[in-house]
């Protein structure tokens, strides 16, 4: 089943796209906080199959903080979804 492109997902994917364009498509890891996105939004994108959880990069702090957000990366489906995003956001 194809995931639904809702307004929150559209806005989140636009933010991911703008960051990917700025940093190149070789973007390895990102956090929701870097984009100003909340945890539920990131989980929604994960459920759609557009992003997946990733290991923290080696350059991350030498310790883990329990409140630290998850690292994410886009999937192939996510990159395809970004390329197919319409110019106008959905009404839903």
Image: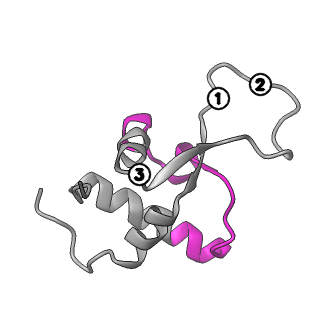
Residue plotted at (43% across, 43% down): 42
Q: Which mark is residue 77?
A: none
Is 4 left, or right, of 84 in this rendering? Answer: left
Please tell me whether mark 2 sits on a helix, a strand or a loop. loop
Query: Which quadrant is home to the N terminus?
Result: bottom left
Q: Quadrant of residue 50?
A: bottom left
Which residue in the protein does label 2 denote?
Answer: 64
Q: Give the image location of residue 67, x and y in percent.
A: 62, 22
- Dot 2, how many residues are within 10 Å of its Cα: few (below 14), some (14-19), or many (20+)? few
- Dot 3, how many residues are within 10 Å of its Cα: few (below 14), some (14-19), or many (20+)? some
> Spatial distance from mark 2 to mark 3, Cα to Cα?
26 Å
Q: Quadrant of residue 41?
A: top left
Residue plotted at (21% across, 69% down): 89
Q: Give the image location of residue 44, x and y in percent.
A: 35, 43
Q: Which residues are magenta?
A: 18-41
Residue plotted at (52% across, 53% down): 35
Please tell me whether mark 1 sits on a helix, a strand or a loop. loop
Mark 2 or mark 3: whose residue is earlier in sequence: 3
Residue 12 drawn above or below residue 86: above
Q: Give the image location of residue 17, x and y in percent.
A: 48, 70
Which residue in the protein does label 1 denote?
Answer: 68
Which residue in the protein does label 3 denote?
Answer: 49
């Amino acid at each position: 089943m194809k995931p639904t492109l809702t307004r929150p997902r559209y806005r989140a994917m636009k933010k991911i796209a703008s960051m990917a364009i700025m940093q190149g498509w070789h973007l390895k890891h990102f956090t929701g906080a870097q984009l100003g996105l909340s945890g539920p939004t990131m989980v929604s994108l994960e459920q759609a199959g557009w992003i997946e959880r990733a290991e923290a990069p080696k350059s991350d702090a030498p310790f883990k903080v329990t409140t630290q957000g998850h690292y994410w990366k886009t999937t192939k489906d996510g990159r395809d979804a970004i390329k197919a995003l319409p110019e106008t956001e959905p009404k839903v």
